[in-house]
Amino acid sequence: MKDSYCQARLIEKNLIRAVIFTGEPLEGVFASLLVDQKKIYPLKAGRRHSSNGILMCDFALEKDLELGHSYQLHIQHLGNIPLDVSEATSFPDFEEKYYYDGPLGARYSKQKTLFSLWAPLASSVILKYRFAPKQEWAFIEMERGDKGVYHGEIKGDHPVIYYLYEVVNSEVYTEVADPYAKSSTANGECSVSLDFASILSPYDEQALPRMPSPTSCVIYEGHVRDLTIDHHTDIAHKGKFLGLSEPNRKTDGGHPAGLDYLTYLGITHLQLLPIYDYQTVDERHPELSYNWGYDSAQYFVPEGSYSTDPDDPIARVKELSVMIRALESRGIRVVMDVVFNHVYEARDSIFEKVVPNYYFRRWHKGKMTNCSGCGNDLASERKMVSKLILDCCKWWIDAYHIRGFRFDLMGIIDVATLNAIKDYAKKVDPTFLLYGEGWNMGSDIGGAPLGTMANYAHLPDYGFFNDVFRENVKAYCAGSEDRQQAAKAVYTSSSLDFIMPRRFLDARQSINYVECHDNETYFDYLSAYDPNMPLENKLDRSKLALSMVLLSYGVPFIHAGQEIALSKWGSHNSYNQGDHYNKFSYKVLDDRFEMAEFAKGLISLRRKTSFLHVYDPRLIDQLIDVVDFGKCIHVIYLDHNTIAPLKEAEVFLNPTDSPYSYNHPTPMSARLGKDGVKEAGKEEAIGKIEARSAAIFVKK
């Protein structure tokens, strides 16, 4: 009918609603349901409503509509209209009826490769495959099984299979990659099944030092490209996984670079910004663009721009594995930054193409939530989304030996999913690190608790980025005297009712930091705080802030380059601003290597000083007294049994431009000053605390 248009949607399990836009009069609506292009069932019109050329008409079904078939609504004079069944994902029993707890994705064996895709709304799924990039495609019609899972198999020993799915949802055909694919060609153009057992080598657990508690760890945050791209080194594979696996690399000034520099610092964990596939860097031409990687695309697939050949699906897998083994051989565990709160874009994501209207959280009236600020939020509370997240974490733990997860915008993820990840991770490795951003993003999922800082008691094994530590330590070390009391409070890990209300169960939950990839660097913060501040003062204050991070109770976290006071040229959000803003500058490292030496000494001191690893707030309360000494913070260690073999230990933190002197009740030896950590020497009655510095005094 000219100037007429119709939509049809399943709005309840047994109710279809048609909306007809027409300028022509309709005396009656005569409709039938066409099923699988074969069977026709007459329908009786029910409730009708007409207004301004729009007619809405409901059609009740004799029984609930069974998903997995092709459905078209035939209306006399209008023809066949595809029936949209995507609303079924919100029906009350959908989760129970279609939750599938079996394996998904491609599973290789020498006898056959199995393929399973959860697509409960789909009326048809075809597996499109080939064994080499330039072969002709072959096709297999997959069989629908229980819970809306489509299964297919390719017989024979095929260690490499290139494949895609052709999915039909509500009569709409889509070609899509596998949400569970473990590797792919460049830019996610094609999923690839592999024989992973022949590619991944075993990892050496014995190379990793014992970590009694998260407070024994020192986390260093970096980005694969940033840590290797600078031309002031002889790293061969710049910007690549392999670049972080190369031993004996040097800066132009002869200092350690890449893997050797991380080893030199003495960190225990390297937290890498996302290393799985993200959207906005062309993997074939990574030199043309830059991104941190928070625009998720394929959760199980290593990022191809970090590979030497993004079109080789084996290369990205093998080279990532080589990098992790190289780091572990130096005693460094890898923490993976995971982004399970949103994807790059919902509309064109593999998830929306496979199961429309399921994977993303919506408000009660249907509008997609945007608490992440990225246009979409993953609905982690939905059973198959939670399963996807858990399966993904299991894969990275088991296949690549990841030994920690940092959760981006963790406050959007539900507590039950987070604790399911914890149960698996801790069973594999009791020292596994779990932490994230516990900001309250305003999301609401009907009463189920989310991973916000306010829900710390629900997540006893998770750490939270302590923004109160960050803001007060930044300001105090910059010279804000009014932050002294707050800085004293956060020094004790925010787990005591001391000056401020407690925020955490114990010190293991406090991730102490003043700088991370987000926001400006601390050096840039100081430049904005006082534009006239001399360079020497900024470097001193950077060392003081690092000292507070490493000497406070909690889990120390350092952003790559913080230890040498790198700048991002004032940028607050350099996520796509390129190497100039983001790279680790080995030229600056050469110029300020004494700052790296200071950091190395302080990290070593932290790791060797077991009383800094105490996390029980009751023990911390008994162990230390935190008082004022002029404008300095003075920390006095009280419990000799805890600090043994030392008899006494004291810490001073001086953010002022004036030196202080302190009369020790009994002579003590300086262990840390502005020039760094040193062995305890002669004990003296007067301790000197230099301007803009931290000092430690001990008595053996």
Image (cartoon, helix red, strand yellow):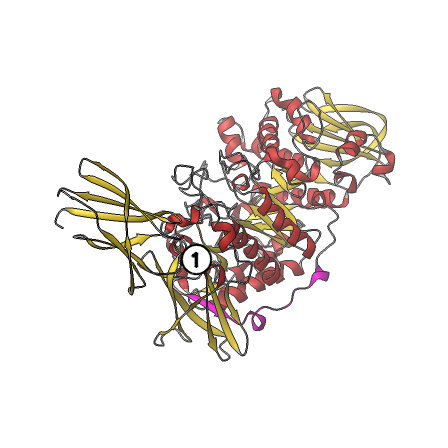
Residue shown at 47% from the left, 68% from the top:
115
**Residue span colored magenta:** 191-207
Q: Is residue 68 above or below residue 579?
A: below
From the viewer's side, name the closer residue of 338 and 98. Answer: 98
Instruction: Give how far across and how far down residue 686 sits, in percent.
Output: 80, 26
Going by the image, does 29 lie left or right of 453? left
Residue shown at 49% from the left, 80% from the top:
156
Label 1, residues with CA under 10 Å away: few <14, some 14-19, many ≥20: many
Instruction: Give how far across and how far down residue 467 sits, in percent.
Output: 58, 33
Q: Is residue 575 above or below residue 198?
A: above
Instruction: Give how far across and how far down residue 204 sits, in percent.
Output: 68, 64
Which amino acid type is marked by label 1?
Answer: Pro
Is residue 126 magenta-colored? no
From the viewer's side, name the closer residue of 281 and 452. Answer: 452
Give the quadrant of the C terminus: top right
Give the residue at mark 1.
120
Q: Quadrant of residue 689?
A: top right
Q: Quadrant of residue 35?
A: bottom left
